């Protein structure tokens, strides 16, 4: 959804627009909030009396000419008016794009702020404000996710991290960055003493972390994810990335492809899983002399790309083909309980800890 409180004609990046509402003086639960910044979704998580509450927004936007306002008002779609156009955010942008026959725009690309999107910063500011809500105490801790630098692309995360630090701070929170895949270990591996290998299969990247008793021994990312699958599958059969994405969203069973299009998608899912596992094995061999593992640890799989039907069956098959040569003893392979929310929930665990230490 878009920001329902944004007045028409307002500059999206003004300090006034981002200024937080007064915090609650005595929150009923420990302060702290987790913010997962993904290429496809922004997800926040905070604790309430009833448990963990999450909020999600699609990380997309749509710009339309000013004369579209009449139709938008008629459909009760929230929008923000700028000098030369109107802006729709989130799920509403996806829905409206179909009506106007346009492609929604994405402020993130390959897991990081898109250098091609000139409107990225102002859009991200509004999206983050909407997902976070108001702080419950002054300078409430907010742990937000950042990917590890990719092994296979010359891109760093410094600019990405600093931009989000500024946005989160303007929303009234005390920002602190946390590794995306490590957050999954904090969310899903409590009974193992926060030890495990986490794979976060996202749209723009796949992030990996290995930890023992909360201590990180290995973190990296590869610049391959759901978008990479769509691009490669489309190129291999002369189709379009949008068509491949639409097929996936309608539902593909990776264990039983029905046609040539779905078969291409399966091939590249398998290639992505193979590549990620092989990178873990190779990277661990490089640090094995400095990081001793004294027990078996689980593999935890998460992320939106892992939601495809049959993904875990495919992952297990590829892993079992490599188990004997895999340099790490694995106790089990499991999927996160809520793959879209696991990163935000793990960041929340860390944010609450920060709040209790202060």
Image (tube, helix red, strand yellow):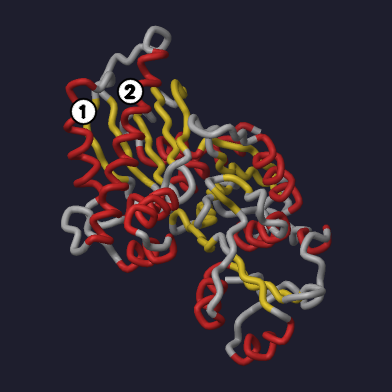
What number is the disc on residue 334?
Answer: none
Query: How many numbered marks are there?
Result: 2
Q: Residue at x 51, y 53 (%)?
A: 45
Categorize mark 2 by other alpha carbons within 10 Å: few (<14), some (14-19), many (20+): some
Report which quarter residue 262 is drawn in: bottom left
Quadrant location of the C terminus? top right
Nearer the observer, 286 or 14: 286
Q: Secondary structure at mark 2?
A: helix
Q: Give percent across and percent down for residue 146.
A: 57, 40
Q: Is residue 280 above or below residue 246?
A: above
Residue 24 in sight here: no
Q: Give percent across and percent down for residue 28.
A: 57, 54
Nearer the observer, 137 or 56: 56
Q: Residue furthest top?
A: 289
State left or right for residue 241 relative to residue 334.
right
What number is the disc on residue 281?
Answer: 2
Q: Residue at x 83, y 62 (%)?
A: 16
Tell me the CA gap for discs 1 and 2. Answer: 10 Å
Q: Residue at x 72, y 50 (%)?
A: 167
State left or right for residue 266 relative to residue 242.
left
Q: Secondary structure at mark 1?
A: helix
Quadrant location of the N terminus? bottom right
Q: Residue at x 67, y 35 (%)?
A: 158
**Residue matched to label 1:** 322
Q: Earlier in the sequence, mark 1 or mark 2?
A: 2
Q: Give percent across and percent down for residue 297.
A: 29, 26
Residue 41 in sight here: yes
State left or right for residue 229 relative to residue 274.
right
Residues marked 1 and 2 touching at CB (< 8 Å): yes
């Amino acid at each position: 959804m878009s920001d329902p409180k944004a007045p028409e004609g307002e500059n999206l990046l003004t300090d006034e627009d981002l200024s937080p509402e007064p915090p609650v003086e005595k929150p009923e639960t420990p302060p702290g909030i987790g913010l997962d910044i993904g290429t496809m979704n922004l997800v926040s998580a905070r604790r309430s009396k009833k448990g963990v509450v999450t909020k999600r927004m699609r990380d997309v936007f749509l710009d339309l000419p000013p004369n579209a306002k009449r139709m938008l008002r008629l459909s009760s779609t929230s929008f923000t008016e700028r000098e030369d156009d109107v802006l729709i955010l989130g799920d509403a942008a996806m829905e409206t794009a179909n009506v106007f026959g346009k492609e929604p725009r994405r402020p993130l690309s390959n897991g990081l702020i898109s250098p091609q999107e000139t409107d990225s910063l102002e859009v991200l500011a509004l999206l983050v404000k909407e997902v976070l809500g108001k702080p419950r105490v002054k300078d409430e801790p907010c742990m937000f996710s950042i990917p590890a630098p990719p092994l296979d692309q010359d891109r760093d995360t410094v600019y990405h991290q600093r931009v989000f630090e500024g946005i989160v701070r303007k929303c009234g929170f005390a920002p602190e960055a946390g590794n995306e895949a490590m957050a999954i270990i904090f969310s899903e591996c409590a009974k193992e003493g926060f030890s495990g290998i986490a794979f976060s299969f996202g749209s723009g990247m796949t992030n990996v972390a290995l930890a023992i008793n909360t201590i990180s021994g290995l973190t990296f990312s590869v610049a391959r994810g759901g978008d990479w699958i769509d691009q490669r599958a489309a190129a291999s059969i002369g189709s379009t990335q949008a068509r491949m994405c639409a097929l996936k969203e309608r539902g593909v069973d990776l264990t039983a492809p029905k046609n040539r299009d779905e078969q291409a998608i399966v091939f590249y899912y398998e290639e992505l899983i193979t590549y990620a596992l092989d990178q873990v094995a190779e990277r661990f061999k490089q640090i094995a002399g400095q990081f001793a593992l004294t027990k078996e640890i689980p593999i935890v799989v998460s992320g939106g790309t892992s939601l495809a039907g049959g993904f875990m069956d495919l992952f297990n098959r590829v892993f079992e083909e490599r188990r004997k040569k895999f340099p790490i003893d694995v106790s089990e392979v499991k999927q996160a309980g809520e793959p879209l929310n696991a990163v935000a929930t793990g960041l929340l665990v860390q944010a609450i800890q920060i709040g209790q230490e202060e």
